[in-house]
Image (cartoon, rainbow, N blue to C red):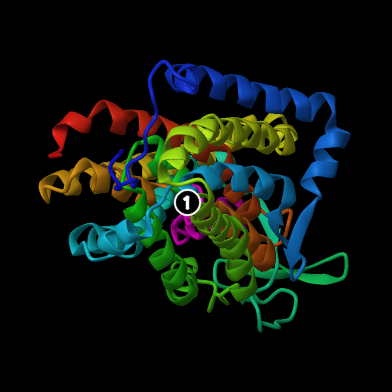
């Protein structure tokens, strides 16, 4: 009988998903190109799908098509998790502590520093030193037109008081919101693809979800410097429920039922084999949808996308390298090292987008920056997954 420890992902080369795994970069590239093409040739379809959302205070929080795809990405991972192993993973203090320190003690501040350097100094001339953006006034602030507030000035736009700030600062705000929102959903897919310890990943998803409720507003408000950042409680809870709790509960219940009706051997040798292609297929469909939604943005603002993408890319690689390197120094096994590095590198872009829209407005530079986070997240994280797989031999078993 196969071993009971099912927290390490298993792809069988040459079977089922082998062709997906071997040529994943090709499929990702085709999916991105297909998504942009769909968005340009059938913009009406893309707009209808993009408009299918659950909103909180007028801000889109849950994209229903993406939530459906994410469910099918998550379910094959959740159903194979042995919760006895999750409890064991939660008792491993070194990987848990390292992940928390990187996510909350390092990542928000490196995101701020890298984004400030590139957007506020190196790329400022390309963005436009005099370019400005109109954003919502911070919550609870009511100043007359012409009054200065922080780095901006209160102006009237169509009879509504808005805050006029340098455009690069608006982009910086979006990057900050990404930096203080560690991933609590897609990271399960990254850890799964990297053949990491799914139990440790799930433990950290739970801890990050709870920690975000406390630290998201504190760190975000401090780094934004525009006053106290209200915690988007409803957005956070709704996102965590739909993206994590729903597939987790479904996987747990169905695992119990299958064990009771068919037995553990049938579950492992038949049921899991049938699920093998589902995660990757759902991931590729998600890419097509994401890039079809934002294809017009990419085409209309190619250089703007580039200026914002550079610091986000460097931040992601830096945090991954730090987490992976420290895991190696602490002699963590590969199964814990891979998800530790990937959890820190990825962002909860759904919450970041919702917060940017609520705080600054749908058409703000901050909202655009969080959208760029969506566009680079999947390709960059897949690159890091490949790095993990190629360097497994550096870690103890």
Kindly indicate the quadrant of the structure image that contains residue 190.
top left
Q: Is residue 215 above or below residue 247?
A: below
Which stretch appears magenta? 166-187
Is residue 101 something that shows in the picture?
no
Q: Measured from the top left, where is residue 9 in percent x and y?
A: 37, 39
Q: Mark 1, residues whose alpha carbon is within 10 Å: few (<14), some, or many (≥20)?
A: some
Q: Nearer the viewer, residue 123 or 261?
A: 261
Instruction: Describe the element under mark 1 as helix, strand or loop.
Output: helix
Q: Nearer the viewer, residue 304 or 181?
A: 181
Q: Measured from the top left, where is residue 300 in percent x and y?
A: 72, 32
Q: Is residue 349 left or right of residue 301?
A: left
Is residue 203 something that shows in the picture?
yes
| Residue 167 lies within the magenta run | yes
Quarter that holds the C terminus? top left
Q: Main secondary structure of the magenta part?
A: helix
Q: Measured from the top left, where is residue 345 in percent x and y?
A: 38, 47
Residue positioned 70% across, 82% down in the render: 143
Residue topped by disc 1: 259
Kindly indicate the quadrant of the structure image that contains residue 15.
top left
Residue positioned 67% across, 77% down in the render: 147
Q: Is residue 242 above or below residue 17?
A: below
């Amino acid at each position: 009988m196969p071993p009971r420890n099912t927290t390490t992902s298993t792809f069988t080369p040459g079977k089922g998903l082998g062709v997906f795994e071997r040529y994943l970069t090709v499929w990702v590239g085709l999916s991105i190109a297909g998504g942009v093409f769909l968005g340009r040739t059938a913009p009406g379809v893309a707009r209808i799908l993009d408009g299918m959302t659950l909103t909180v205070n007028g801000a889109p929080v849950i994209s229903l098509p993406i939530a459906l795809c994410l469910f099918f990405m998550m379910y094959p991972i959740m159903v194979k998790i042995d919760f006895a192993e999750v409890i064991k993973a939660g008792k491993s203090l070194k990987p848990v502590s390292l992940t928390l320190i990187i996510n909350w003690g390092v990542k928000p501040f490196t995101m701020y520093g890298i984004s400030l350097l590139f957007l506020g100094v190196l790329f400022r001339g390309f963005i436009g030193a005099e370019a400005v953006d109109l954003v919502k006034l911070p919550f609870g602030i009511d100043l007359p037109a012409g009054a200065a507030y922080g780095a901006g000035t209160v102006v009237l736009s169509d009879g509504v008081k808005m805050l006029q700030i340098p455009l690069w600062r608006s982009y910086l705000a979006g990057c900050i919101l990404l930096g203080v929102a560690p991933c609590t959903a897609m990271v399960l897919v990254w850890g799964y693809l990297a053949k990491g310890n799914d139990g440790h990943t799930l433990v950290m998803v739970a801890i990050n979800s709870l920690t975000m409720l406390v630290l998201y507003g504190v760190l975000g408000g401090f780094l934004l410097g525009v006053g106290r950042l209200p915690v988007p409680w409803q957005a956070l809870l709704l996102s965590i429920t739909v993206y994590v709790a729903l597939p987790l509960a479904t996987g747990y219940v169905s695992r119990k039922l299958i064990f009771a009706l068919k037995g553990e051997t049938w579950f492992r040798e038949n049921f899991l084999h049938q699920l093998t292609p589902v995660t990757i297929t759902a991931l590729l469909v998600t890419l097509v949808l994401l890039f079809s939604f934002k294809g017009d943005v990419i085409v209309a603002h190619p250089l703007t996308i580039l200026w914002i993408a550079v610091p986000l890319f460097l931040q992601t690689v830096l945090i991954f390298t730090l987490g992976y390197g420290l895991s190696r120094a602490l002699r963590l096994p590969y199964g814990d090292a891979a998800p530790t590095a990937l959890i820190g590198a990825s962002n909860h872009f759904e919450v970041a987008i919702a917060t940017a829209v609520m705080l600054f407005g749908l058409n703000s530079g901050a909202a655009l920056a969080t959208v760029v986070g969506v566009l680079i997240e999947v390709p960059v994280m897949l690159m890091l997954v490949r790095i993990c797989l190629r360097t497994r031999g550096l870690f103890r078993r």
